[in-house]
Amino acid sequence: YNKKGVGMSIYPNPVRDVLNIELNRNLNAKITVIVTDITGRTYLRKQYDMSGQNNMIRIDASSWNRQQYIVKVISDNGETMAIQKFIK
């Protein structure tokens, strides 16, 4: 799922230690990244400043359990911009 042309690439998939989230364009705004498992348990909820030339987020996932996860990117006004699944 992506909204307003905001695409997201997640790699590697499956993830070992570091989850890389790359947005397909510079948003020049603050976003919130939420990572949950498929039961809805939140593993990460963090705000990132994507101003400037930054379109990459690196997340330490080394301590997470081996299972399926969902990552959501939320705009600063609360709108869901992208959703993608990945495996650890």
Image (cartoon, rainbow, N blue to C red):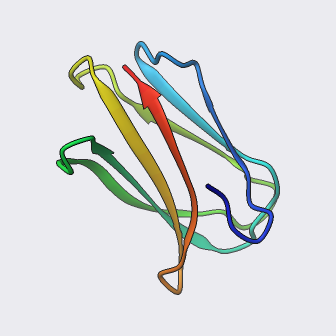
The x, y position of residue 73, in whole percent, is 52, 60
Question: Does 59 appear above or below 71?
Answer: above
The x, y position of residue 29, in whole percent, is 66, 74
Rendered-image quadrant of the N terminus = bottom right
Point 31% across, 20% down: residue: 62
Point 69% across, 68% down: residue: 3
Point 46% across, 23% down: residue: 18
Q: Is residue 25 left or right of residue 67?
A: right
Residue 31 image-quadrant placement? bottom right
The x, y position of residue 12, in whole percent, is 58, 18
Of residues 69 and 47, the one nearer the viewer is 69
Q: Is residue 58 left or right of residue 29?
A: left
The x, y position of residue 71, in whole percent, is 44, 47
Q: Is residue 8 left or right of residue 72?
A: right
Question: Does 70 appear above or below 63?
Answer: below
Question: Does 16 appear above or below 30?
Answer: above
Point 47% across, 55% down: residue: 72
Of residues 27 and 66, the one nearer the viewer is 66
Of residues 82 and 24, the one nearer the viewer is 82
Rendered-image quadrant of the C terminus = top left
Q: How many marks?
A: 0
